[in-house]
Amino acid sequence: MTTPLLSVKDLVIEFNTEHGLIRAVDRISFDIFEGETVGLVGESGCGKSITSLSILGLIPSPPGRIGAESSIKYQGKELVGLPEEQLRLMRGHDISMIFQEPMTALNPVFTVGNQMMEVIMRHKKVNKKEALKMAVKMLEDVGIPAPEKRVHNYPHQLSGGMRQRVMIAMALSCNPHLLLADEPTTALDVTIQAQVMDLMGDMQKKQNMAVILVTHDLGVVAEFCQRVIVMYCGHIAEVGTVDQIFNRPQHPYTKGLLASVPRVLEEKVEFLPTISGTVPDLGNLPKGCRFADRCERATEECNAKPPQLTIDEKTQAGVACYHPYK
Amino acid sequence: MTNEQNKQETIKKETLWTKAVRKFFRDKMGVISFSIVCLYALIALGVACGFWATEWSELNPDMKNTGPSADFWLGTNILGQDIYQRAIFSTKTAFEVGLVVALVATMLGAIVGCLSGYFSGTWIDEFFLWIIGCIDCIPFYLFVAAVGFAVNTLAQNLNASFGIEGFEYFAMHIAMIATFWTATARLVRGEVIKIKHLEFVEAAHAIGVPGPKIIFKHILPNTFHILLVQATIAFVSAIKSEVILSYLGLGVKNTVSWGKMIAEATQEVPAGIYSNFFAASAFLFVLVMAFNIFADALQDALDPKKVS
Amino acid sequence: MDNLLEVKNLKKYFPIKGGFFRTVVGNVKAVDDVSFVLKKGKTLGVVGESGCGKSTLGRAILRLHEPTSGEVVFEGKDITGLSHEEMVAKRREMQIIFQDPFASLNPRLTVFQIIVEPLEIHEIGTAEERYEKVCSLMDLVGLRRQYMHRYPHEFSGGQRQRIGIARALTMNPKFIVADEPVSALDVSVQSQVLNLIRKLQQEFGISFMFIAHDLAVVQHICDDVAVMYLGRMVEKAKAEDLYKSPKHPYTQALLSAIPQPDPNRHIDRIVLEGDVPSPINPPSGCPFHNRCIHVKEICKAVVPPVINTGTAENEHIVRCHLFSEEEQAKSKGETAKPTAESETTS
């Protein structure tokens, strides 16, 4: 087994809030290997976005902080506790990030080209002219028509889909090995989403980078990813390949979630299957399994002690449940 | 199912206001400044009820311009009046001016801002904006002085022709209200324009709620946080402006205020007598300072972005 | 008379003001010539991407936005001409559920105050009757009565959406516009709310106009589905027909673009080129022609007519030149006309 590109161990992220210390992410561990696409899925508040932000050291602190025993290793190098300057050097160069809302992630007072050149010149020893050339090349690669003109546009002059393409171009301008995409298509329309996802797939193949796709959309994951990490309430519920997760889900949460997604089917169903109840409040978590209250298979055991996730070394799959579906 | 119950029960029953209050009391500087303001308010209340500083206008012809003593803690002024008592009494004047101006100006600003914002894009809005624009064009103190002077003259005429008395007492209040409401109106107008496009206002339309009720039940209460902060700002501004106006001779009548004391001191300071000046300035400074910090803390506590 | 709602040639233009004197320099044609019929107890799904005018259509029908022209016939009566007072009375029967569970509830009112407000406005019932009504509504939408005196911010998104639904139900309406009621919700909560709406359809026979941006969401609860593009209804049919055999190239693309949570299913995706054009300056002719893979010369010049490819009682309406072989001869003569005025409505 090759060494993972990114190895997250016992990651704890806590937030100081008015209602006391809240653990948004509680001792999660996972590995990402070179060139693979991993979907990080879960509902709002499950800690998926916070996890991806913590990899780049972008957790707002205070109120947030990463637990003392947490470890995030990138190519064997510990990222937790790394000084800000060193992290900044890695951002964009080794690890890049795409955000949900491209309009807020781009600075409205600079042209697209300016912002791209800034990234390029920070990480590569090139002069302004070369940087501009590279920026135009990148825009061309992400399929923006007339890139030599568009490079002088301001973000507000571009449509939502275009902006997300620019974000991708910026994120990929220094050939990172790992791309963190936080809900990259949530703000976009369905037809534009298809374009952007296709583009991301192409770019990934071209640059052979690993992608962590943070999303709540199971459809996007099924079509785009090889492996899936399902999070629930700050814990990892299940890890597996797309085939395992979608065809043979073991965790009752995964199964319930998949069933409740409305999909285009030949047959019309009267009522959609649902998961009863709501996600527990992070400030008042149950003692045992966090899904136990909503789970039909829950027993005494589930309420007493949270199940542990054991990931099989070989298959990189695992489930945190006492009574998984077989 | 049980989960949903649990969740509901854990959430503390808390309104937006109690939350803001709790947040406010976590701010140490805010609490200290608030206590100072309360202390001043207590002093003012005592004066109003006649508990203390009742001899503020009493003349002691044989005790002119004396220094601090056991009888007169801060000395006496040129007429032999007790400066300490006068400074204490002025607290009541300051609160009265501040409260009247803050309340009326904020209410006026709220109503105008609400109407202007709700009818934005129509002639009603244009009209109010025009008035606000005109008032804001005129240098502030010049305008206050002009209105104060005009109302004063009017009051004298009223007194002479119709025998209506006491109107001149409010000349200064009216002058300040006439200028202070515009800032509130502008802010409220902006907020109302934002709120009126929110879906709950649309929902009210869909239910068939009549226009005035939408304005005063659904929109106006959602600007209360702005109004409260604006009122505190108006309160401080009114007290400060009162000093200037008193100095110009347009201040309160038949009573004493810190502004009047400072105006008196203009004759005393060249002669080397500072107690009047220092007493008034110190009282004024501490109140304004405390109130400003209190207003800042209040603003933080009420900021909906921080109430999350 | 089983037609509850009949919308005829409804238009809603927003004027664009510009220049020194703020004169009208153009129009955003948010809803452009939309017609449909909704039968009692049936649900129409309206699907389209952002900016296609689907929300404006819903609001124009309720006269929350005053329609520019066209008719909205509700129970046999055109409501576009009603006076303010008459309209207020009509509002008891037509309600709306909003998308944003946070912006749609007044943060300063308690749940009770929110749900009871329609009864107060229309002066219905005594205090006890109102209280009883609110209780029964909260039971109906699955909220515990104990939370009656809490404020909206104490609830989760799904529960807030239930409060919004309860408010819409207070007056026992016959027709409800549901404007993307589940778009802002998590998947597991989304299905709960969809099932609640399904229950309301069945128990009370309420007609819904269900607006969504996702074809997958509306399939289970709609009888008919309409697809909108740039202010126009480009296709409308029975839900089964539309999903089985989408006619309009845009519907086909929209349907194939939905990512399916099923790795085994590989459909050939039609990926559309480019973005949705701005409704301020829509393309001439068929508004979809610049992204369409089947584009022909005629599409660039003539607005496609409304064509029924189905039967008279089982309509499948498409606005596309691909289906107007026999119509082409007729429309050729009108090609010379530069504007969109040549269109006819069947």
Image: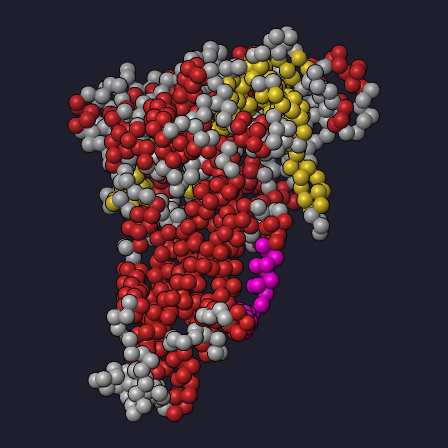
The answer to whether residue A197 is seen in the rendering is: no
Closer to the camera in the image, A303 or A71: A303
| Residue under the image location 47 percent in, 45 percent down | B216
| Residue under the image location 25 percent in, 82 percent down | B73
Residue B64, position in %: x, y? 32, 90
- The colour scheme applied to this rendered structure is secondary structure
C259 to the left or right of C286: left
Residue C1, position in %: x, y? 58, 11
Closer to the camera in the image, A101 or C176: C176
The answer to whether residue C309 is seen in the rendering is: yes
Position of residue C203 relative to residue B57, above or below, is above
Position of residue B294 relative to residue A324, above or below, is below
Residue A24, position in %: x, y? 30, 39
Position of residue A116 relative to residue C39, above or below, is below
Closer to the camera in the image, B153 or A6: B153
| Residue under the image location 43 percent in, 54 percent down | B227
Residue A50, position in %: x, y? 36, 40
Closer to the camera in the image, A183 or C4: C4
Q: Is residue C168 magenta?
A: no
Position of residue B103 relative to residue B259, above or below, is above
Boundaries of the magenta span: B128-154
A272 to the left or right of B208: left
| Residue under the image location 56 percent in, 17 percent down | C4
Q: Quadrant of the C terminus of chain A?
A: top left
Identify the image quadrant of residue C134.
top left
Q: Quadrant of the N terminus of chain A?
A: top left
